[in-house]
Every structure is written in structure tokens, then in C-alpha cells.
Image (tube, rainbow, N blue to C red):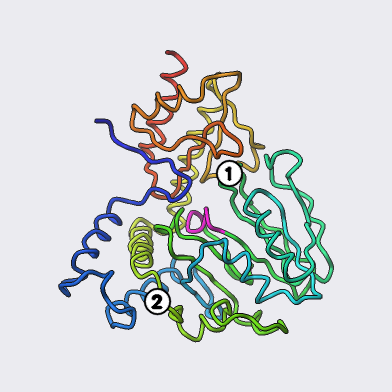
């Protein structure tokens, strides 16, 4: 049986050490004789683990002291609502960049709570690039960006600066957080679902600057209020303890392997290899503008007509799983997140070359 490589866009590949540690914790957590899934979230072992996980986030991303780190639920999709609910007044304006399906969903939710200015959009070109002109509102409370587009394979490499002196950036970093260094101080709020580069689905990371809170005059449901979650240390309700533990193990693995800076170099190398093959292999092309190509999600299609099902089957028999493109665009997509080893990319390249000569 060939070595299996999982190219899923999410839930995505986890390092084997994370899977092993999580499996052990599911049976007996740290010698306590009971599963981590059975332990009270108020118990010292769990509280210590959550605190350690927060510290790992702070160390790896160099999070300044004036930011809170929260572990919430509901994925990025819930943050699409929580952000405007907590930060955007009914008569205020927020700027949003439209670079794909997830940013479009964020825009739709924000429109329920205030005025939304779509500052730029790549929709007319099927989101194959990052717009270079961002037409901001002078009074926008915040500017929202989706840092990486998992479906269309684009990524922001530099972020626009809010023109409102009191404004700030808000970023959905679900699919590229911890893949490269970021300057957290550039942002008022960062959020990310875990199931790409942090762990399994079930927990959402939110990093929020303290001074942007408490400025909206509306009644916010208790659980949807960031201040509630801050006051309760992410434990207003029972948190997804096993998911947080998997994040803990993933971030520990990242730290042990040189941190975000070292991982960024590995990711750049993996992506370059794969894009180079797409460029030189006459069977395939990339639909994405070269300067905006994602290091995390690499979509590609046949240069001419081809049998997509046949190529997917060809790859599947070689242990290369979940390469089918998103249902909205078709083609192929290789998600090469942090935990995808270079050997997986090499195996895919070999399969592409063998298919071309077969």
C-alpha cells in the first residue's frame, strides 16, 4: 500500500505526533486514568492545558500584551456575525474586501448590523487575483480582509492600511495562520477556524485588541459578546477541550520545528516546487495570477479538455487523496498546509509527470 498523503482543504492533514498524542489523551490524559474527554474543563489539568495553549499562541505569533486570546466555537462562520455585532454600530460603516466565497459570506452577515462598503472585489474575474485598488470609506470602523482564499487559491502578501486614523484591520486567517510571520499589531482582530493549520474542527481562535471593545450601542446576546468570553477566559460554556488539546500539540510541534519563520521557508519551498511543475507540465495550468498565488491552496486545471475523474483516480491509486477542486470551480486543488511534508508534494509532482507521459 502506498504512503497516503491527504491534500484536503479542511479538515486538513495533522502531523503524526499530534494524532498520536491526541489518541493517547483520549484514553488516559497524563496518567490521570481518565480520558481528556471526560475531564471537567474546570479541573486543573485542563485549565493548565488551555493556559499553555494560549501561551503558545502568544509566543509563536508574538502577540502584544494589549490583545486577548480566545478559544471559541462556531468556526469562522460565527465570527462573520460576532464581529459586526460587537464592533459595528447600526449607523456606522465597515469596509470589506471581496476576494472569494468566505469574504462574501462575511459581507452578507455584516450587512445585518451596519453599513458595508465593498472596497474591492475580484468576483468578475472568478476571484483569480487580489485587487490592487481598495476604495475605502473615510469613516470606516474597520477594514475586513480574508488573508487566504481556500477555494480560488489567492493570498494577500501585503495588507492595505485603513485610511481612517481610528480604523483598524480585521482578518479571517483561517487557512494561513501560523504558516508565515504576521505583525499582530497591524490588526484590531484576527480570527481563524482551527481545521487548516491548527488542529481539528471545533475550536476557533480569536485575537482581539482590548481598546476596540465596548463601543457599540446595542444589546448583544451574552454568549456572542466578546467581553463575556474574555471575562470567563473562553469558558462561559464548556469549551471543546479535545480540539484545544490538538491545537496545543500542533503548536508545540510547530515550536519544536523552528516556529513560524522556519515553517514559512518550508511552505515557500513546497509551493514553488508545485507551481513550477504546473508551469512546465503541458497538461496543467494555474488559473491564478502569479503574484497572488497562495502558498497554502494550489488549484490547477487541465490546459485543454481532460478527464478529471481519471486523473483523480490515477492519483488516488498512488495514495494522493482529496485532490478534487471545490465543487463551485472544479479542477484540482492541492492544499499544502504546514503539516503536509515536502515528500507529499514530491509524490504529487511525480504523479503529474507520470500521468503526462502515460
Relative placement, left or right, of 128 versus 134 is left
Question: Residue 95 bears which disc, if any?
Answer: none
Q: Residue at x 43, y 52 (%)?
A: 263
Pinpoint residue 81: horizontal percent, then vertical percent.
63, 68
Q: Quadrant of residue 302?
A: top right
Most common SS among magenta residues: loop
Q: Position of residue 87 (x, y in %)?
A: 68, 75
Element carrying mark 1: loop
Q: Earlier in the sequence, mark 2 or mark 1?
A: 1
Specify the quadrant of the image occupied by residue 27. bottom left
Quadrant for the C terminus in the image: top left
Residue furthest to the top in view is 358
Counting other residues with Cα less than 10 Å from the Cα at mark 2, is it few (<14), some (14-19), or many (20 or more)? few
Q: Is residue 176 magenta?
A: yes
282 displayed left or right of 266: right
* Quarter-of-image position of residue 336: top left
Image label count = 2
Q: Which residues are drawn in magenta? A: 173-180
The numbered mark at residue 238 is 2
Q: Which residue is denoted by mark 1 in the rendering? A: 151
**Relative vertical location of residue 283 with respect to residue 250 in this rendering, above or below:** above
| Circle 2: element type | loop
Q: Quadrant of the N terminus?
A: top left
Is 81 left or right of 45, judged from the image as shown? right
1 sits left or right of 119 in the view? left
- For residue 333, above or below residue 215: above
The residue drawn where x is 42% and y is 49% is 12
Nearest the eye: 105 or 99: 105
Q: Between residues 341 and 110, which one lies in front from this camera angle? A: 110
Residue 102 sits inside the magenta stretch: no
Amino acid at each position: 500500500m502506498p504512503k497516503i498523503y491527504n491534500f484536503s482543504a479542511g479538515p486538513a492533514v495533522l502531523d503524526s505526533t499530534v494524532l498520536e498524542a491526541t489518541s493517547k489523551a483520549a484514553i488516559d490524559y497524563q496518567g490521570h486514568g481518565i480520558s481528556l474527554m471526560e475531564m471537567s474543563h474546570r479541573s486543573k489539568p485542563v485549565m493548565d492545558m488551555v493556559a499553555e495553549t494560549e501561551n503558545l499562541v502568544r509566543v509563536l505569533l508574538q502577540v502584544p500584551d494589549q490583545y486577548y486570546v480566545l478559544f471559541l466555537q462556531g468556526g469562522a462562520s460565527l465570527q462573520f456575525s460576532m464581529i459586526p455585532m460587537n464592533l459595528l454600530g447600526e449607523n456606522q460603516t465597515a469596509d470589506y474586501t471581496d476576494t472569494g466565497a468566505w469574504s462574501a459570506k462575511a459581507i452578507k452577515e455584516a450587512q445585518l448590523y451596519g453599513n458595508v462598503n465593498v472596497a474591492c472585489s475580484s468576483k468578475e474575474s472568478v476571484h483569480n487575483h487580489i485587487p490592487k485598488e481598495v476604495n475605502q470609506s473615510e469613516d470606516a470602523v474597520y477594514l475586513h480582509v480574508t488573508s487566504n482564499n481556500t477555494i480560488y487559491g489567492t493570498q494577500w502578501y501585503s495588507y492595505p492600511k485603513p485610511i481612517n486614523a481610528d480604523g483598524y484591520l480585521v482578518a479571517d486567517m483561517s487557512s494561513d495562520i501560523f504558516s508565515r510571520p504576521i505583525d499582530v499589531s497591524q490588526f484590531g482582530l484576527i480570527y481563524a477556524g482551527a481545521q487548516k493549520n491548527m488542529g481539528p474542527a471545533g475550536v476557533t481562535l480569536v485575537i482581539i485588541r482590548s481598546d476596540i471593545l465596548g463601543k457599540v450601542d446595542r444589546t448583544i446576546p451574552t454568549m456572542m459578546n466578546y467581553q463575556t468570553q474574555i471575562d470567563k477566559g473562553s469558558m462561559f460554556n464548556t469549551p471543546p477541550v479535545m480540539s484545544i488539546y490538538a491545537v496545543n500539540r500542533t503548536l508545540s510541534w510547530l515550536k519544536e520545528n523552528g516556529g513560524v519563520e522556519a515553517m514559512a521557508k518550508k511552505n515557500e519551498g513546497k509551493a514553488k516546487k508545485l507551481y513550477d511543475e504546473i508551469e512546465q507540465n503541458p497538461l496543467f495550468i494555474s488559473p491564478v495570477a502569479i503574484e497572488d498565488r497562495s502558498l497554502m491552496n494550489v488549484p490547477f486545471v487541465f490546459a485543454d479538455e481532460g478527464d478529471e475523474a481519471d486523473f483523480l483516480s490515477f492519483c488516488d491509486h498512488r495514495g494522493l487523496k482529496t485532490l478534487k477542486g471545490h465543487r463551485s470551480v472544479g479542477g484540482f486543488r492541492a492544499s499544502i498546509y504546514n503539516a503536509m511534508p515536502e515528500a507529499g508534494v514530491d509524490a504529487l509532482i511525480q504523479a503529474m509527470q507520470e500521468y503526462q507521459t502515460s
